[in-house]
Image (cartoon, grey):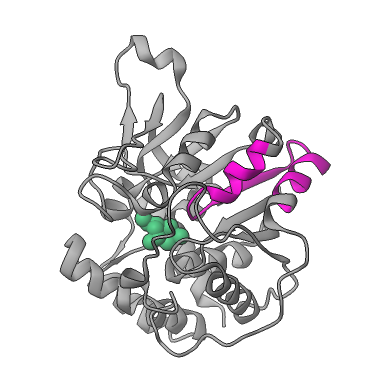
Amino acid sequence: MTRRLVIDTDTASDDAVALLMAVAGPDVEVDAVTVVAGNVPLAQGVKNALFTLAFCGAAEVPVHAGLDRPLVRRLGTATDVHGEDGMGDAGIVRSVGEPVAEHAVDALVRLANEAPGERDLVTLGPLTNVAAALVRDRDLLTKYRRTVMMAGSPDSVGNVTATAEFNVWADPEAASIVLNAPGEKVLVGWNISRRQAVMGPAEQQRLATLGTARARFVSDINVKVAEYCRTVTGLDGYDLPDPVTMAVAMRPELVRRSEKLPVSVALGDELRGQLIIDHRVAGRAGASAEVVWEIDEQGWKELLFAACSED
Ligand code: BDR
Ligand code: CA
């Protein structure tokens, strides 16, 4: 069965790896890439998405530019994590092609409505575009088969603040709108990234041994993230939040343990972007998302290595 994906991304280094995995997937078709401001300003994210798709031989995938700032907050980028260009400042990103004219929000609404139940939505950035699309079409997410999101930290260990994950922190109001919308939602949070999606020394060595252009690309664009992990988050290597999310979207059977839970978002300044999860039995009736607690680590990493094996 071919899985048809629409990918919403604030394209920086780990988003780029996720795009690479999706277009390399033999039974995956990427119907559109929609870009949102987040890791980098919108124009840079669009440039990175176009470059990455062209680099992977998938220049035909349409790239739609979306919203250039969060719904309510000021844009706070993550160039300290991913580099000024979002791609590790490795000097490899060139301008390639142009985005299509259709706005990302229009594309998200059109793609859901023209073939309800046929596509999956994967979100790799702040949820601004998706929330704006939901304002237009409240049932939007019921028309995607499911929405797999790199969003939040269900165990409240943060990467951008002590308790918040970047994508939810960047636009918490948008995340709140999305979590409250009807439709099947799967959360792959920073709990998974920091435990089961770290490229440690052995994995970095395996990537280097592949010796392909794609393997070098993955390694080069993540140099800044590796530095951030060493100095801020304290991981032994660099984590790949968006690629592990893409792996779950491509192969749902990689999920080993998950729970349907009521998830909401803290909007006050002190705990901005922290996920609030009601674990009480009484609260579970209002479950809003499937929270992933454990995945098949070796399985998803094999998908990554397979994607990097081709040149
Ligand atoms: C998320 O934020 C960004 O830094 C990454 O691209 C990922 O989507 C991780 O918190
Ligand atoms: Ca991202």
Q: Residue at x 23, y 41 (%)?
A: 270
Q: Residue at x 44, y 71 (%)?
A: 13
Q: Give the range drawn in magenta.
A: 107-135
Q: 75 above or below 192?
A: below
Residue 110 part of the magenta-drawn span? yes
- Nearer to the camera, 207 or 97: 97
Residue 255 appears at what percent x and percent y?
43, 41
**Count of numbered circles in the view:** 0
Residue 101 appears at what percent x and percent y?
78, 66
- Describe residue 190's horizontal placement relative to residue 52 as left or right: left
Q: 88 above or below 188?
A: below
- Describe residue 43's horizontal placement relative to residue 279 as left or right: right
Quarter of the image where one finds residue 35: bottom right
- The quadrant of the image that shows the C terminus is bottom right
Q: Residue at x 29, y 42 (%)?
A: 269
Confirm whether residue 165 shows in the render.
Answer: yes
